[in-house]
């Protein structure tokens, strides 16, 4: 396992950042997924959508250039790129639900081998609400879950989610600091593995059934 | 011909106990803060608030929650305001969580005279509880119903004296949708301009939808 | 009867124009209803909506000021007033269906004592289509039908429409060159009469039952 | 980074017999006339056209009807094009008449990932034939279903090289809604500008929705 959480998160973010092609519209969730924007490879121009109403979201503003009217879905100050546009929430979710967003990257409380996701409520304990997550995972063409492989030693990838679902059968890919899985009609497939990990370690820390892809690769991060 | 400017006192008179109020903004970006100040001062109780989220304890409509003036919120997210969760657990605040896209679509339905929409969002989750499920061409949808308010409070960046509104950058969010879905609509103008100063193509809320324009002292 | 059709139409338009108050949002249909705009009384500022996407529609442009991008729902060149705005068709019909338009004024093939209207199709003969008429009569707060009292000697106001309906039970007021009727829960009420007409003439030319209002007035035109 | 400009020939290659095509515009205001020229030249047949109306015999998409390239239209109005009525009576053109607000809402559903909407429009008329009626709180509504196309042809007044579109005045109409509801979206640019020249708040169709930008010779 990778003990340095910060390192682990950046491994995940770097790996996810390699998935995109130029001009694809991508929505990054709050928290870990936000890191992905820092790792987009040179020469690839990903277009970021923010569900509060913006396409062409740019980085945090330079000191002195902050504009309180330009925020992301986490309420943080951001900037807009020259090809960007603003719109209302109805249009924003029409874009999301209408399959106009190529990728959404979101975190998880639990994710399972059927591609179901739990991310918005721990009943009786923590109830942040779903925000736009339900719309994003059902609406985006591709759903990537970014998650640490375990939390306090417990696997995050399960046979079946126990917590209330964000959506059923929607996840396409799961990226952790140790491995990359694809959700296929035949079940979960391990397609990439961190060079410092092993199939045994992944099996020991994953509470789901998975097959090892014949094309298993080393995670490029 | 247009006499829409409303005083602080007259706006305060509009707000009553037990009202259902929509408030624009997203994490307090685009929220009409001065109108919220007035409601805080007046101290009305038992409000139902429809908004994207409950903002923060000290910013946005979260201040009304913190002041215990709210008995119910219909929102997509409460994570940034610990008071909301606390009052929910204590049983003094009812929280209806609605997926963000469904929330805005339900408000749009009310404003657009639609009886409801079919959405795939929430199928197979807790969100489907108590809702009619309708299958179209083999796909399951939830029937989501309109959401209306007595009062909508809108945060406008540029407002002309007729009531045309422009929302800068990401302040737009729920504002123009809510401006169609309430009996009375009040816009707080960050900047008030003369009629004709706003390009007709840039208007995001047409003047006839706005009943009252409130101009906070700092904007005068 | 008034033989001069042009005069008759202007009587109708003048009478309808007196219904509005300042700042009310009004949609005028194609044809006869368009004339209403010419007769708005001095000091009253009605706001015209055009369902192709405009609020604050102004008159036909002055020669030399024509802009092919500014048209009304009939496809004619118009202008926009300083307080005007443009929007797309979804927003336009959200305004209409959502009860944000105070009055719609439309013509009729037939209109009946129950407030039902037929205006979009004569099967096998003439099929222009409903355009925005169905939305307007169901959505507007008040529906005024402007129609010549008869066409080729036949009454336009019937007990029950024979042609396919535009909408059922939606009309509030019917204005002809001879009379003004209100559709009430108790049936059709004659509320105004042209000073040159008579109740007998109206009875003879109306194929509907109606009561004569106790407050019957002379039409102010 | 954006390579969206399409030649006349490449656009012609996109258009095929039997296609379902949405065309923006209202009585030919906002209609991409040059794209229609290309379809006329190519002479593809058996098209299904979704649009507000069938324009005129010599203007707008009505020219395609007059050239007998169309076998079905889904529109709200055909009164300004006598060819449409004639071919309908002759039985060579199928005409589906849809109330204008329902038409745009159905297109919006397709673009917005909604399974349908409940509208009060058409209840008690011929429009309700064959449709599911749903009663909500005692009011009858028709369930209207999404309407999608393989190709959408959009008339843009100002288009930047990324594909952001502004529609001037009443040219907007169905254009931005259709730009969300087709597999491939082509905008005809009356005026092409550099990226950054359009104010971000004024963009009416965001760039990622546009697949191809066609710049007619007269606009160059």
Image (cartoon, coloured by chain):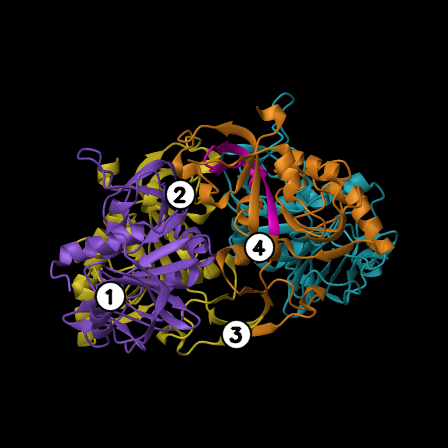
Chain colours: A cyan, B orange, C purple, D yellow
- Residue annotated with mark 2: C22
| Residues tagged by mark 4 and mark 2 found on one chain of the structure | no
Farthest top residue in view: A64
In this figure, which residue is indicated by the disc labeled 3? Answer: D134
Q: Are marks 2 and 3 in contact (CB under 8 Å)?
A: no
- Is residue A94 visible in the rendered image? The answer is yes
Residue hosting label 4: B107
Span highlighted in magenta in the image = B150-172
Left or right? Give the position of C205 relative to A35.
left
Element marked by disc 3:
strand
The Cα atoms of the two marked residues, 2 and 1, are separated by 33 Å
Classify residue D164 by image quadrant: top left
Q: Is mark 3 in CB contact (under 8 Å) with mark 1?
A: no
Please tell me whether mark 4 sits on a helix, a strand or a loop. helix
Whole-number angstrom distance, CA of label 2 to CA of label 3: 38 Å
Disc 1: which residue: C128
Left or right: where B101 falls relative to C120: right
Relative image position of residue C106 (x, y in whole percent)? 30, 60
Q: Residue furthest front?
A: C214
Residue D147 picture quarter: bottom left
């Amino acid at each position: 396992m990778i003990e340095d959480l910060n390192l682990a998160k950046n491994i995940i973010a770097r790996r996810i950042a390699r998935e995109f092609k130029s001009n694809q519209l991508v929505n990054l969730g709050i928290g870990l997924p936000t890191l992905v924007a820092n790792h987009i490879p040179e020469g690839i121009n990903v277009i970021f959508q923010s569900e509060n109403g913006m396409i062409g979201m740019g980085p945090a503003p330079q000191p002195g250039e902050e504009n309180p009217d330009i925020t992301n879905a986490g309420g943080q100050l951001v900037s807009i790129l020259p090809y960007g546009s603003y719109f209302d929430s109805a249009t924003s979710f029409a874009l999301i639900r209408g399959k106009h967003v190529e990728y959404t990257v979101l975190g998880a409380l639990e994710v399972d081998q059927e591609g179901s996701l739990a991310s918005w409520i721990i009943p009786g304990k923590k109830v942040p609400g779903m925000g736009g997550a339900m719309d994003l995972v059902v609406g985006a063409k591709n759903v990537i879950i970014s998650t640490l492989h375990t939390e306090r030693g417990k696997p995050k990838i399960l046979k079946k989610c126990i917590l209330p679902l964000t959506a059923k059968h929607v996840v396409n890919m799961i990226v952790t600091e140790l491995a990359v899985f694809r959700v296929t009609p035949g079940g979960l497939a391990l397609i990439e593995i961190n060079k410092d990990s092993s199939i045994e370690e992944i099996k020991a820390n994953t509470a789901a059934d998975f097959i090892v892809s014949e094309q298993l690769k080393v995670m490029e991060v | 011909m247009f006499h829409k400017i409303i005083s602080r006192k007259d706006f305060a008179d509009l707000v009553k106990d037990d009202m259902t109020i929509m408030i624009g903004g997203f994490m307090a970006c685009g929220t009409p803060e001065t109108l919220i100040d007035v409601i805080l001062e007046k101290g009305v109780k038992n409000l139902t608030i429809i908004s994207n989220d409950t903002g923060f304890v000290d910013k946005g409509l979260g201040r009304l929650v913190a002041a215990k003036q709210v008995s119910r919120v219909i929102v997509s997210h409460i994570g940034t305001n610990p008071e909301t969760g606390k009052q929910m657990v204590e049983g003094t605040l009812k929280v209806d969580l609605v997926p963000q896209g469904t929330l805005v679509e339900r408000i749009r339905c009310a404003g657009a005279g639609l009886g409801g929409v079919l959405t795939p969002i929430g199928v197979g989750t807790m969100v489907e509880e108590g809702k009619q499920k309708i299958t179209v061409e083999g796909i399951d949808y939830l029937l989501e119903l309109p959401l209306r308010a007595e009062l909508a409070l809108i945060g406008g960046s540029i407002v002309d004296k007729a009531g045309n509104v422009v929302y800068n950058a990401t302040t737009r969010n729920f504002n123009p949708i809510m401006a169609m879905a309430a009996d009375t609509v009040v816009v707080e103008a960050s900047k008030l301009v003369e009629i004709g100063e706003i390009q007709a193509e840039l208007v995001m809320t047409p003047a006839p939808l706005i009943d009252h324009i409130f101009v906070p002292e700092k904007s005068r």
